[in-house]
Amino acid sequence: MIRKKLFSIACALIVWVIGVSFYLLSYYIPILENPERQSNIILALAIIPSACFGTYLFYKKEQMNPSYLALTFIIVAVSMDALITVPLFIIPSGGDHASFFGDPFFYILVVEFYFTVLYYGNYLTKKIKT
């Protein structure tokens, strides 16, 4: 049981690293005039395949209720954002925790992340059962 939880946290960390990487790399490829909006759009698009990848990695070796896995992924991502993303990347550019976690787009991303993991987790668990 503990191994399953630790593995789900490890998969969530992989997804978080992929998401932060896309977010940061999007600043180096200027497409839109507003780099903050561009990075949020890139992150919203990158969450889907990275969440599916992390979910696939988890279900390849372990089993868990998809809603619990989705909550684990969300808790890990939000914790890492509070501990690493905001202090290292947001505060130096003039932001703070309140502006980061007060942005409505943050909550849109959280909902997208949750439902992506939930949907793909349900798909994979039904595929395994049949």
Image: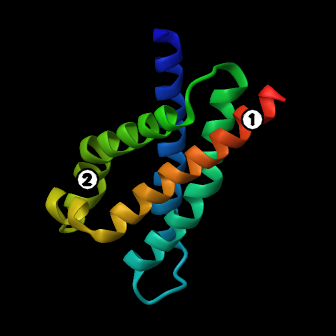
**Which residue corresponds to the image point at 51% horizontal and 33% vertical from the top-left?**
69
Q: Note whether 104 is above or below 126 in the view shown.
A: below
The residue that appears at 63% across and 28% down in the rendered structure is 58
Q: Is residue 6 above or below residue 14?
A: above
Residue type at mark 2 is Val
Q: Name above or below for residue 79 compared with residue 50.
A: above
Total of numbered circles in the picture? 2
Q: Nearer the viewer, mark 2 or mark 1?
A: 1
Residue 17 is situated, as x and y percent measured from the top left of the image, at 49, 44
Q: Quadrant of the C terminus?
A: top right
* Residue shown at 62% from the left, 48% from the top: 119
Residue tagged by mark 1? Answer: 126
Q: Nearer the viewer, residue 49 or 27?
A: 49
Is mark 2 in CB contact (under 8 Å) with mark 1?
no
Q: In the figure, is residue 52 to the left or right of 44?
A: right
Residue 3 is left or right of residue 81, and the answer is right
Q: Check disc 1 and give the amino acid type.
A: Lys
| Residue 46: % across, % down | 58, 60
Badge 2 is on which residue?
A: 86
Note whether 75 is above or below 46 in the view shown: above
The single residue placed furthest to the right in the displayed view is 130
Q: Position of residue 123 (x, y in %)?
A: 72, 42
- Mark 2 is surrounded, within 10 Å at the Cα level, by few (under 14), some (14 to 19) or many (20 or more) other residues, namely many
Give how far across and how far down residue 87 sits, in percent: 22, 50
Q: Secondary structure at mark 2?
A: helix
Q: Secondary structure at mark 1?
A: helix
Category of crowding for the residue at label 1, using alpha-carbon neighbours closer than 10 angstroms: few (below 14), some (14–19), many (at least 20): few
